[in-house]
Amino acid sequence: MATPRVSRIGEGAYLVENEGQSAIVYVAGPPESPWAFWNGRIFNSASGSPSTAPRPRSERSADERETLTAPMPATVRAVLVRPGAAVKKGDAVVVLEAMKMELPIRAHGDGVVRAVHCAAGELVQPDTVLVELART
């Protein structure tokens, strides 16, 4: 496996190239506990894994609710869904802004929006529930 090439392209933004593919990774937070945002997922250096990773379908009940939470202190820039709306895996449901970067919060699977707990302009703290989904 080739070693990825990383280039800084802006404040907190990096271009990662590996084996003919490229992606932009955003990094924010204090140096002792940075967060990385890549491909709709947020990683914290303390855990090394996605902060909002869904459980495998085999471990979920049919009517389980999924909560999408704020990964860091942020401002809600846009709420893109309403209760009752159907969402598909990967759909952005809320857009946050933190440290001058937009962070779309995405559904981890197909579902229906059960509740929205935030509004545009609201300041949210880490682990604040933004949206509840009923998984389908």
Image (cartoon, rainbow, N blue to C red):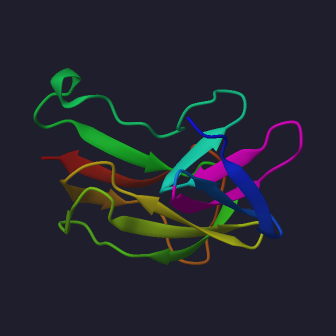
The answer to which of 123 and 31 lies nearer the viewer is: 31
On screen, residue 92 above or below 46:
below
Q: Count up the numbered dots.
A: 0
Q: Residue at x 78, y 44 (%)?
A: 34
> Can residue 51 be seen by looking at this rendering?
yes
On screen, residue 78 above or below 41:
below
Q: Residue at x 53, y 51 (%)?
A: 19
Q: Position of residue 52 (x, y in %)?
A: 47, 40
Answer with left or right where residue 30 lies relative to residue 100.
Answer: right
Magenta span main SS: strand
Q: Position of residue 63 (x, y in %)?
A: 13, 37
> Can residue 128 be seen by looking at this rendering?
no
Q: Which residues are magenta?
A: 20-37
Q: Residue at x 47, y 60 (%)?
A: 105
Q: Position of residue 106 (x, y in %)?
A: 40, 59
Q: Residue at x 61, y 77 (%)?
A: 121
Quadrant where the N terminus sits is top right
The answer to which of 19 and 87 lies nearer the viewer is: 19
Kindly give the residue lying farthest to the right in the view shown. Answer: 31
- Was residue 30 drawn as part of the magenta stretch in this picture? yes
Kindly give the residue lying farthest to the top in the view shown. Answer: 59
Answer with left or right where residue 135 lies relative to residue 115.
Answer: left
- Was residue 40 drawn as part of the magenta stretch in this picture? no
Q: Quadrant of residue 101?
A: bottom right
Q: Position of residue 27 (x, y in %)?
A: 74, 55
